[in-house]
Image (spheres, rainbow, N blue to C red):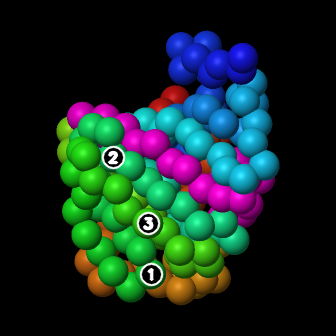
């Protein structure tokens, strides 16, 4: 029996102030061909899954906290207990808007890597309104910082 234990999955920290721990897929002991799943913690006041799109369809489920969800041209506040469906190819962003962490679970399919992870780490994430469609009116700005750049700012 394959078991993924969140306490044993280090995960990855991104410059947009979030930690992603793969439960199914990636570095997890569980790999499936039809879906990937993970546990994400967005830091208080602005931690983010930045504006991006991907081939897979996806669902975000908010476990705790409150976030601003941008999906295509729409913007809405999501709270604990709510899930949002993200169709294939649609740009989306989730930003923590509270002073406590936001925790969410994602599930997308089919399984596989998503480009925005690599782009964030490399500092090549396409910029909203410049390289890709703009965020909805009134949305929190997209974070395109690399983790190394954020660390330097804190020095």
SS of the residue under disc 3:
strand
Mark 2 to mark 3 CA distance (whole Å)? 12 Å
Q: What element carries label 2?
A: strand
Q: From the viewer's perspective, is 125 left or right of 74? A: right
Residue annotated with mark 3? 85
Q: Is residue 113 magenta?
A: yes
Q: How crowded is the residue under tag 3: few (<14 C-alpha within 10 Å), some, or many (20+)? A: few
Residue depicted at 54% across the width and 20% down the height: 6
Disc 1 or disc 3, which is closer to the eye? Answer: 3
**x and y percent of residue 16 in the render?**
50, 48
Residue 117, percent across and down?
A: 68, 52
Is 127 colored magenta in this rendering?
no
In the image, which residues are magenta?
100-125
Characterize the local packing of mark 2: few (<14), some (14-19) or many (20 or more) Cα atoms within 10 angstroms: many
Residue 110 vertical placement versus 73 (above, below): above
Numbered-mark total? 3
| Identity of the residue drawn at 43% across and 36% down | 41
Is residue 153 or residue 44 the one in the foreground? 44
Instruction: Write down the residue under mark 1.
Output: 72
Q: Residue at x 72, y 53 (%)?
A: 34
* Residue 153 horizontal/vertical position (percent): 51, 40
Q: Is residue 18 visible?
A: yes
**Among numbered discs 1 and 2, the one appearing first in the sequence:** 2
Residue at 60% across, 83% down: 132
Of circles 1 and 2, the one toward us is 2
Q: Is mark 1 on a helix, strand or loop?
A: loop
Q: How crowded is mark 1: few (under 14 residues within 10 Å), some or many (20 or more)?
A: some
Q: Where is residue 51 in the image (x, y as percent from the top left)?
A: 51, 67
For label 2, the residue is 62
The mark that comes first in sequence, 2 or 3, is: 2
Horizontal side, residue 67 vs residue 59: left or right: left
Residue 149 appearing in the image: no
């Amino acid at each position: 029996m394959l078991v993924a234990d969140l306490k044993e999955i280090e995960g990855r920290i991104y410059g947009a102030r979030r930690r992603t721990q793969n439960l199914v897929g990636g570095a997890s002991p569980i790999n499936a061909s039809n879906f990937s799943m993970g546990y994400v913690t967005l830091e208080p006041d602005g931690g983010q899954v930045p504006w991006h799109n991907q081939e897979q369809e996806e669902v975000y489920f908010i476990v705790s906290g409150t976030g601003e969800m941008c999906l295509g041209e729409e913007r809405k506040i999501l709270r604990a207990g709510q899930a949002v469906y993200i169709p294939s190819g649609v740009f989306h962003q989730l930003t923590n808007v509270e002073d406590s962490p936001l925790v969410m679970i994602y599930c997308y399919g089919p399984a596989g890597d998503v480009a925005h992870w690599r782009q964030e780490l490399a500092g090549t994430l396409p910029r909203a309104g410049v390289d890709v469609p703009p965020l909805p009116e009134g949305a929190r700005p997209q974070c395109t910082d690399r983790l190394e750049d954020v660390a330097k700012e804190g020095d």
